[in-house]
Amino acid sequence: MTERTTGTSSSAWRNWAGNVTVRPERTAAPASAEELAALVARAAAEGLRVKAVGTGHSFTAAAATDGLLIRPERLTGVHAVDRAAGTVTVAAGTPLRRLNETLSAHGLSLANMGDIMEQTVSGAVSTGTHGTGRDSASLAAQITGLELVTADGSRLTCSASENPDVFAAARLGLGALGVITAITFAVEPEFLLRAREEPMPFDRVTAEFDQLVAENEHFEFYWFPHTDSCTTKRNNRSAGPAAPPGRVAGWVEDELLANGLFQAVCTVGRAVPAAVPGIAKVAGRALSARTYTDVAYKVFTSPRRVRFLEMEYALPREAAVAALRELRAMIERTGLRIGFPVEVRTAPADDVPLSTAYGRDTAYLAVHMYRGTPYRAYFTAAEQIMTAHGGRPHWGKLHSRDAAYLAGAYPRFAEFGALRDRLDPQRVFGNDYLRRVLGP
């Protein structure tokens, strides 16, 4: 185990977007659940607060602490693959990329995932990471078991049959119930996805949204503000054969255009806001139609090298189009210059108490701004639209909601709070973000 006392600027931890910086009193990188449990018990006895971080892809301060910061880099690896049960058990600090590559080597796959693979499995599930899907839900909804270190250093094994109340909540626990040490996911035989990406006018996408969601296993689209342009993506299972993008063509689309050119136009837009509408028209036409077939995780995910800030809200699915049209009207009315596309995805209802899709079929609307660009006016106006439709903010993305609002948005909010009181009455795992969104 490595542990060190910090307090200098060189010891600061920053998230991926660079908007959260913490300087904990100590950091530690345990290599086992036993080491982690001892660290937590010691910190609690000393009156230190404890938080575990992943790779920092959350835009909020969910993992911030001035006490003991648990780093994930040694708590990694796949513990067990059970083909008969259709499960894989993995250490909490394992990056999603490593999990997916290991599953593929065993001919297995997750049913669905988000659009990046850089997160740790624990960080991804704890903040509600999701992809898009008509029938298949978020990563947290794919969990069948987990191991948790609680505030007194105890270790709990949780599933639907063992500590079921903790299991239900800790699948998406914001780090408020304890530190996850291992997760068991449901998996299935590896499958291919046929991806069909193509431009589509705004009016057509919104008019046909329900049909596009119903007809495709995984549908999403991006709308480019200041334009009538959208880029759509339809992913459906395929019998094959695999036909991945060619090396050159894939590099042009995913690196040169989606990252390199986009980085350049974002930089210009930040320096010259008046140029944003014209740039948006160019960006909206830059990506051409393409179709390819590949193993699922390679289709679900893509590189994201342009750094940004993001806010995302989960709405009742039937409210998605109305909210998007209101967002468009707001941008036009206010004269805001928005250089980043708006992302729209879906998810089926699930039973995870703090899941943004709990109890209702859901659509997600995500707004972004390039890092270093003023974002508050845009995010505030967008948030007013989302909350008017009963929106639930993504736990790992910027928002201004507090416990009073969220208690009305989640039917089992009080149940989660009571469990937190039982497992962590002294708020060893507390911080300012959790105080705001969960209450004291």
Image (tube, rainbow, N blue to C red):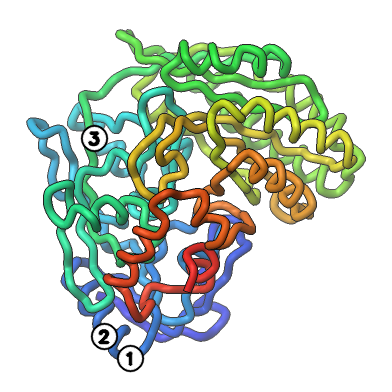
Three-letter amino acid code at the position of disc 2: Arg
Q: Amino acid at mark 1?
A: Glu
Q: Tell me the residue that label 1 is attached to.
A: 46
- Counting every numbered tag in the picture gives 3
Nearer to us in this view, 241 or 187: 187
Residue with the mark numbered 3: 103
Foreground residue among 163 and 171: 163
Q: CA distance from mark 2 to mark 3?
A: 36 Å
Please rate how many residues cluster around mark 1, counting C-alpha atoms within 10 Å: few if below 14, some from 14 to 19, many from 20.
few
Q: Position of residue 211 (x, y in %)?
A: 54, 11
Q: Residue at x 34, y 67 (%)?
A: 420
Horizontally, is 100 left or right of 279 in the view?
Answer: left
The answer to whether residue 369 shows anywhere in this view is no
Residue drawn at point x = 45 percent, y = 22 percent: 218
Badge 2: residue crowd in 10 Å (few <14, some 14–19, many ≥20): some
The type of residue carrying mark 3 is Leu
In primary-sequence order, the first of circles 2 and 3 is 2
Q: Nearer the viewer, mark 3 or mark 1?
A: 1
Query: Which numbered marker is on residue 390?
Result: none
Q: Examine the rendered structure and indicate whether residue 90 appears above or below residue 147.
A: above
Q: Can you give x and y, in whole percent of width and height, for residue 247 in the image? A: 49, 22
Residue 269 placement (x, y as % from top left): 82, 42
Secondary structure of the residue carrying numbered label 1? loop
Write the residue at 39% across / 71% down. 51
Residue with the mark numbered 2: 42
Q: CA distance from mark 1 to mark 2?
A: 6 Å
Q: In the displayed structure, does residue 137 sit left or right of residue 403? A: left
Q: Nearer the viewer, residue 7 or 369?
A: 369
